[in-house]
Amino acid sequence: MAVTEDELCTPESLWGMEVSKLSKNKPTESILSEIVCAKCSRRKFLQVAGLATAATALGGMPIVGQKLRTISAAHAEELASGAPKWIYTCCNMCGGQSGIKVLVENGIVKKIEPNDFNPIGVANISTDFAKEKSRGARMCPKGNSAVKSLYDPDRLKTPVRRVGERGSGKWEPITWDEAISEVATRLGEIKQKYGPQALVWFSEDHSFTHVQVDFCTAYGTPNYHNHSNLCDVARKLGFKLVMGDDRPLADFQNSKYTLLFGWNPLGATKWALLPAIINRGRENGMKLVVVDPVFSATAAKADEWVPIRPGADGAMALGMGHVIVTEKLYDKAFIDEWVVGFDEYAEYVKDKTPEWAEKITSVPADTIRRIARELAATKPAVVDAWSGPGHHTNATQGTRAIASLPALLGQYDKPGTMVIPDKKGGKHRSDVAGWDTTNAKGARVDGLGTKYPFGHKSGIYVEARDAMISGKPYQPKAAVFVFQNFVMSVPNGAKNREAVKNMDFVLCVDTHMSETAQMADIVVPGSHALERYDLNSNWVTFPALALRQPAVKSWVGGMPEYEFVMAVARKMGFPGFDISYEELLDAELKGGIKIGLADLKALPGATWIGGETKYEKYAAEIKLPDGAVTSDKGVIKDASGKQVGMKKGDKSVRGFFTPSGKIELYAKKFAEKGFDANPAYTDPEVMPGEGYDLYLVAWKQAEHTHTRTFNNAWLMEMKPDNPLLMNSVTGKKLGIKDGDEVWIESAYAKAKSRVQFTEGIHPEVVGLQHGYGHSALGKIAKGKGTDDGQFCAGKAELASGQAITKEIAVKVYKA
């Protein structure tokens, strides 16, 4: 029986489709139908959801013919018990992975609170964590709203098969066994007919990625991609080229001066600890300067907001570098000992005066000169940048210019500076005998390693997308999307839809009928974070690893994504997947931090702390590993080829993980591939002009994650839409009034929005909060706001392969 996607979210209609064979508890769905209305009170919601999920937990929703391998018998018994209990786990409402504790009673989530044992909600320096955790951890609004996403009545409740034209919204329900068998068969046929490289795979960048990588390796495709390419790979490459680590962390709490380029940690809160450590830093006398086209939540708390043209951050950093070098404000002793390329850098910035930078950035030369002097005179200092500068076609060089400022001042890996994290985690298994590793290491469809020699292992989304359309360098035939709304997340939605439509077979695994799921052949219900496992190696400066573990059973009768992928792998006869996920995690933990899964569960807060923050690690002596090799340049690598240190006189020290073992202001390795060895400024490829006279930027706020959370009633109550922010001066020039309905038009798309005047945006810039404008996902999300991604060209940055989402020129006029 064919049904529409709207009917799939209606419990009453599910029973008309004979989905009852998936469950012994028909009343469960009937009870859940009472919470379809998003207007019900939180108390009523919890009461009703509690009854419904209790019925599921007690009666069970077995999957026909498919043994669930996720949860051990002991843990399943614990989840089924009715007594109130707190379960320590981790949030996944965004990528921050905050530690939480979940109050569960009768199989129902009643309350979520921060986990004080997990540093992600407290502090990123070990001494600060020890001192501050008694004050309590933090979590953001998304974490508090997780219960609303968990019990969202619009969640998919059964696998479905497309029965109409692609994108028509016509489906028929199938069992899990049928879904597993059909996916295995279709992927097997694709491999047999076109070769394993014809499969392209896209996933989120953290959750259960290891099993997906294993599947791709076993299958033989080199074309695995994950979300990092849409996030911060240009920032990663920029810092790595300068100081050898792709994600140094800011020690805000102990800084005396912080300069942020295009980052909004108090709004787009990447980790829950950020507001706490920034506010403590402010209490301790830290000056905060924010460079951003938009008066963000962080700018609102800063001592100074510096509005700048989008994509011009690198020019401002070079102008500051000119001042620091010409006025001899740099740390000469640090540079002499730990920096190479200073002379070349000094020569390059000789003519990059603040006046030169002013013409590019619109920031007054006197402001640039003053901030440079303040920064040089105030230590310890943090200089950092994220997606603002990082989502432009000049992103890597702009980030290099920014990362060079703390290098000039000796402000790396010391208290109150940019600290190199000491991360440890589970050890993922190596290739298993019988996997198609030869093909899996073959030529990628997206140019990673060839066209993009410095690209990140997460792949090049827009290149893979373009190959799905053009068939060059070869034609993908099947696409798998796991926990990833490809159609709305990748820049240029029209191209994304064309690419998916061009596939012979599409599988989507998601909690909701997203815009990508609408275009699939098979859609499989995804899990909620409170229903699954993960290992979270925390982004703090000391070794810390936290466990995500199921707090409740799936009320929709589903299985976690990793279980589905493993089931398909078993069906296809791939070796190495005939184990439970708990067994896999146990082995990874024992291979990494030397404790098992049961040991991790038993630790306070299910969180392992493996040491303290260490500073000036670059100067620390190291013990040479067995098989170590020292190059003629003094760089030391272990037997696997991984850089571990450098020779410094008669000592072996860690150094910086660059080709020279030192900080590099002039990157010879970068130049070998045709890029400028200096952190050179070039204009973004897309700039206002030719009738498109305004910059359009987009950003994220604490209320939402990517395009994922927009069917959450509580979050949408906080932020129901995304009006177009416009400076009132700009509006007056265009004859537009506050509240007017307008057209936003780029060279690639045209859509309506409502204008909201603010003085808190650069006059040459308009902006939208990212993630709105859904045509699907659920009843709450659908039709709210404007999708910013449709206006993008859909390019990648040539150095890092970063997907470009903030480089847009538009015109705005009354509707």
Image: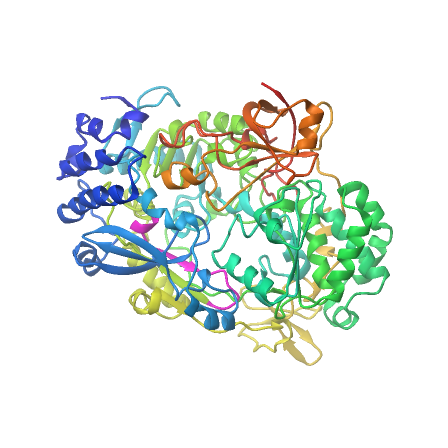
Tell me the magenta residue range.
Answer: 529-543
Left or right: residue 205 versus residue 662 is: left
| Foreground pick, 761 / 652 | 761
Left or right: residue 259 versus residue 794 is: right
Q: Residue at x 49, y 30 (%)?
A: 785
- Quadrant containing the C terminus in the rendered view: top right
Residue 104 sits above or below residue 734 on the image: below
Task: From the top left corner, tell me how far across and down residue 453 is, in percent.
Answer: 63, 47
Task: From the top left corner, tell me how far across and down residue 792 is, in percent.
Answer: 59, 31
| Foreground pick, 501 / 125 | 125
Left or right: residue 493 versus residue 510 is: right
Residue 532 lies in magenta, yes or no?
yes
Task: From the top left corner, tell me how far across and down residue 331 is, in percent.
Answer: 77, 69
Q: Residue at x 66, y 80 (%)?
A: 651
Q: Place residue 249 in its image quadrant.
A: bottom right
| Foreground pick, 68 / 142 | 142
Label count reads 0
Residue 765 sits above or below residue 384 on the image: above
